[in-house]
Amino acid sequence: MSGIKVGVLGSQGKVGQAIVTAVENADDLTYTVGVDKGDSLEFFSDTDTRVVVDFTHPDVVMDNLKYLIANGIHAVVGTTGFTEERLETVRGWLAENPTVGVLIAPNFAIGAVLSMRFAAQAAKYYDSVEVVELHHPQKADAPSGTAYRTAELIGRARAEAGVGPSPDATTEELDGARGAVVDGVRVHSVRLAGLVAHQEVLLGTTGETLTIRHDSLDRSSFAPGVLLGVRKIGDRPGLTVGLEELMDL
Ligand SMILES: NC(=O)C1=CN([C@@H]2O[C@H](COP(=O)(O)OP(=O)(O)OC[C@H]3O[C@@H](n4cnc5c(N)ncnc54)[C@H](OP(=O)(O)O)[C@@H]3O)[C@@H](O)[C@H]2O)C=CC1
Ligand SMILES: O=C(O)C1=N[C@H](C(=O)O)C[C@H](O)C1
């Protein structure tokens, strides 16, 4: 056995299973152990695991990270639910363990990262922008982490360019009909059997619209981005947020 020793948290889950397969198939990585609900995190220390990939649940990911950082294990995290407050807590733990690297990304699919970048670039040229995310019905969080991040990037780009709010004459509304608002951007969440992970950013101005759509058709779409993170995180102490930081964009 040779290469970076990699373990997976949430190894029995939908994404975790795809990551285990990808790690096992990579010549330069060695799969050590999978940990799922009820298993001990000490399996990672016992197997001298160097990098752990976490695809679990927003309710448990902070406890996982606390253990990994305290034990000098690098982490690549796809689990959602990272508010600015949570990120600050992680930064605090990392300050006490300065050799450890943590990568947290709302979406590891290359196309999703690109579509977020394209949406931010386009945002200032259009009067209106709204985000629609569509996912499988087992998903716990709404809006998706990706949609939340996309709206933040769009909101920031529009604020920097001095663009006002999207026009909207709605005065009467059934609760939720116009979606949630993130940094001034409307975000709509669809949950539908048969879907995996999809997002459309709709932009409109006089006489034209632009739609930026990304589809993850299979959970293997997250694996190349995760493996990129696994290979790089050991050389990036501290907190990295977003896969784009590791891509030559
Ligand atoms: N960043 C990205 O690119 C992506 C992020 N995600 C995010 O990843 C997370 C997982 O998604 P998904 O795989 O679909 O979810 P699943 O529910 O299919 O998988 C999660 C797995 O983690 C297990 N688990 C729960 N608690 C613990 C714990 N304390 N320790 C170890 N394992 C635990 C679950 O067990 P049990 O089922 O028994 O509760 C389950 O097997 C979500 O937050 C999702 O939004 C998903 C896709 C891509
Ligand atoms: O739960 C999912 O499935 C996904 N979660 C992430 C998110 O919330 O953005 C990434 C992707 O959309 C799939």
Image (cartoon, rainbow, N blue to C red):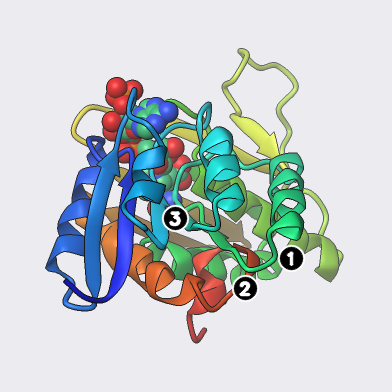
Q: Secondary structure at mark 3?
A: loop
Looking at the image, can residue 205 be seen?
A: yes
Disc 3: which residue: 107
State the CA–CA distance, disc 2 to disc 1. Answer: 7 Å
Residue 50, quarter of picture: bottom left
| Closest to the observer, 51 or 169 | 51
Question: Who's the residue at 49% across and 29% down the image?
Answer: 141
Nearer the camera: disc 2 or disc 3 = 3
Looking at marks 3 and 1 on the same chain, the residue that comes earlier in the sequence is marked by: 3
The answer to the question of whether label 2 and label 1 lie on touching residues, with beta carbons closer than 8 A, is yes
Mark 2 residue type: Gln
Looking at marks 2 and 3 on the same chain, the residue that comes earlier in the sequence is marked by: 3
**Farthest residue in the front direction?**
46
Question: Who's the residue at 55% across and 42% down the image?
Answer: 67
Residue 1 image point, x, y percent: 16, 71
Looking at marks 2 and 1 on the same chain, the residue that comes earlier in the sequence is marked by: 2
Residue 77, relative to residue 13: is it above or below?
below
Residue 131, relative to residue 103: is it above or below?
above
Mark 1 residue type: Ala
Disc 2: which residue: 121
Nearer the camera: disc 3 or disc 1 = 3
Marker disc for residue 204: none
Disc 1: which residue: 157
**Farthest residue in the top direction?**
174
Q: Secondary structure at mark 2?
A: helix
Instruction: For ligand 1, tell me if the residue under mark 3 lies within 8 Å.
Output: yes
Residue 120, quarter of picture: bottom right
